[in-house]
Image (cartoon, rainbow, N blue to C red):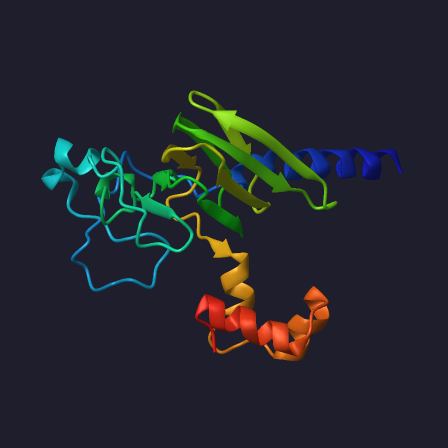
Amino acid sequence: MASFTALLSSTTLFLLLLVPKLSADPDQLQDFCIADTSSPTTLMNGLPCINPNKASANHFTSSALSMVANTSGNPLGISVILLTPQILPGINTLGISMARIDMAAGGVAPPHTHPRATEIVFILRGKLIAGFVDSTNKLFSHVVKTGDVFVFPKGTLHFLQNIGGNTASIIAAFNSQNPGSFLIPFAAFASNPAIPGPVLAKGFQISLEEVGKIRMGLGGH
């Protein structure tokens, strides 16, 4: 019995040691893997690598996040530029990414989740409300301003709203090169094919007519 208990304790410790390794993208097996953006192979976890002998410093730098984006064409008043391996080939397989978010006064990043990454945001300028909801439906919300940071744990429902009078700019970092994003309003009401109306009506406790109005407003079917 004592030996079984010791084995169980050893197994538990082993599994606990594995948890950090499973929390983000897999570790790379080489110094770097510059993304071959011209490769026709797309159905893989990451992108194929170019010959490392052809790597240069240009593969590891980008100015894509340097300029304030135009938010006027977006009904949410927001523009997001995500550093993908197509923009910055050197991040391929490194398990990281960044984004620039520009948000007009009153603009909002609606409730959404990133299934593959924790997100941390740094406020370049502006005043915003940042918040997330945990698995017990508890809201963690705070007013953040220039120079502040806020963390959204992996997979949690979270949002940002610009409550200042001017355009706000944010830099976001992720522990995945492809964090993914589920915008809850669009995922629920503008999916293709559409989620059955009665499911949404029951789930959100609204009428079928209201489901239709929301769908039309979000460009759904």
Q: Is residue 76 above or below residue 161?
A: below
Question: Residue at the location (32% across, 47% down)?
Answer: 71
Is 193 in front, or is 42?
193
Question: Residue at the location (55% across, 72% down)?
Answer: 213
Question: Residue at the location (27% across, 45% down)?
Answer: 70
The answer to whether 10 appears left or right of 61 in the picture is right
Q: Tell me the quarter of the image containing the N terminus.
A: top right
Task: Give the x, y percent position of residue 116.
Answer: 49, 48
Is 34 in front, or is 180?
180
Q: Is residue 213 above or below residue 42?
A: below
The reply to whether residue 122 is visible in this rendering is: yes
Q: Is residue 31 above or below residue 86?
A: above
Label total for image: 0
Q: Residue furthest top?
A: 147
Task: Give the x, y percent position of residue 66.
Answer: 23, 33
Question: Residue at the location (46% across, 75% down)?
Answer: 192
Is 112 in front, or is 164?
164
Q: Is residue 136 above or below residue 60?
A: below
The answer to whether 5 appears left or right of 95 in the picture is right
Task: Give the x, y percent position of residue 86.
Answer: 23, 49
The reply to whether residue 113 is visible in this rendering is: no
Q: Residue furthest front?
A: 165
Task: Give the x, y percent position of residue 40.
Answer: 20, 64
